[in-house]
Structures are given as C-alpha cells and as structure tokens.
C-alpha cells in the first residue's frame, strides 16, 4: 500500500472518511472544475487529524466538479457540487443529505467543511448508537436550526437568498 501511496487511515471507526470524488474527475472535460486539489486539501485537513478522530459516528463528504454531483450509490452526509453563479464564476452548492442549503466560493470549501464537521462533533448524539448519525442530528434539529448553528460558528455570516451569487457569504434557496 505504501508503495502505491495508499493507506487505510480513517477508513473505519467514528471518523471523517476519505473525501469522495467522481471516478472521471480530471478526465471528463464536461465537468466545470477538476476538484482534485480541493479534495486533496480536504483529505489533508481531516485524515489523521485527531480533532476529528472521535465523532459520534462516521461522516462522509463528497466533492464534485459537476452540478449534479456524482453517482456514488448512496447520499453523502455533506457534498459540495460545482456550479456557476450569475456572473458565470465557479461556486459550490453545499448539500446536506442531498438538500442544497446554499452556495460558497471554492476558497470557502475547506473552512465550511471544518465548520460542518465541528457541528457534528460537538452536537451529535454519543449516547445512543441508533441516534448517532449525522442524518439523525440534522433531522432531529431541522435544517433551520442546523443552519443557525452553522451561522453562529461559521467564519462568516451565512445569508439566505434565492439566487446563486458570488460573494464571500453563503446563499440559500
């Protein structure tokens, strides 16, 4: 594994799994953006990071250079899908359990992923294994409370709007 530059760190247990990308990422010229550099930054941020080694349960994050995301045969807890704003600039739709909650710039992806992972780490249920999933936390709180918490700990104020916009804030529709 080491010769192939592969390892199994954080592939089991209550951790953030390796960041999922599309199998054709970087090959298919119809994607809006090759997300390999962002996926690598996310992996470097989370994999092996002891701050994220004891989550209530596993957390799966995906990133895609396509608006529609990738068909990974299940719904990731958190996904970032490239799209374009009204000025034709690349932004990312943030999806929580396949529901779009807003848009951010590529430079905000890592910070937003950290904020989302911290919400799960700090507020996820550790007492009942049946209630320990990210999905349970979001469904139990509701998306509005989840977003309020994200807003309170986020690096920037989150705004709700009805359009894709280019700005340092997150917009939700």
Image: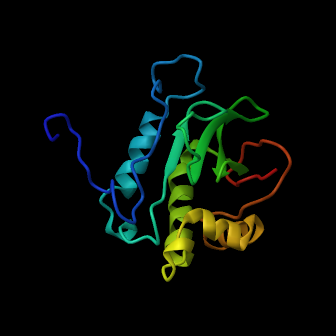
> Image quadrant of residue 66?
top right
Q: Is residue 152 above or below residue 24?
A: below
> Image quadrant of residue 82?
top right
Give the percent coordinates (x, y) of residue 161.
84, 52
The quadrant the N terminus occupies is top left
Q: Is residue 21 left or right of residue 49?
A: right
Q: Is residue 105 left or right of residue 60?
A: right
How did the renderer colour the structure? Answer: rainbow
Q: Is residue 165 above or below residue 29?
A: below
Give the percent coordinates (x, y) of residue 136.
62, 68
The residue that appears at 38% across and 49% down in the rendered structure is: 43
The residue that appears at 60% across and 26% down in the rendered structure is: 32
The single residue placed furthest to the front in the displayed view is 130
The residue that appears at 66% across and 32% down in the rendered structure is: 67
The residue that appears at 49% across and 31% down in the rendered structure is: 22
126 and 45: which one is in front? 126
Give the percent coordinates (x, y) of residue 168.
67, 52
């Amino acid at each position: 594994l080491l010769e192939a530059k592969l390892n199994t760190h954080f592939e089991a247990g209550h951790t953030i799994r390796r960041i999922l990308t599309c199998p054709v990422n970087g090959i298919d010229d119809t994607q809006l953006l090759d997300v390999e550099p962002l996926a690598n930054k996310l992996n470097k941020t989370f994999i092996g990071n002891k701050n994220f080694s004891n989550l209530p349960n596993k957390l799966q994050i995906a990133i895609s250079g396509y608006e529609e995301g990738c068909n990974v045969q299940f719904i990731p807890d958190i996904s970032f899908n490239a799209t374009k704003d009204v000025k034709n600039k690349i932004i990312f739709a943030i999806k929580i359990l396949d529901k779009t909650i807003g848009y951010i710039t590529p430079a905000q992806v890592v910070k937003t992923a950290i904020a989302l992972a911290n919400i799960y780490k700090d507020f996820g249920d550790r007492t009942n294994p049946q209630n320990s999933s990210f999905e349970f936390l979001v469904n139990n709180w509701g998306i509005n409370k989840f977003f309020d918490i994200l807003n309170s700990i986020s690096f920037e104020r989150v705004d709700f709007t009805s359009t894709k916009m280019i700005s340092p804030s997150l917009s939700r529709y």
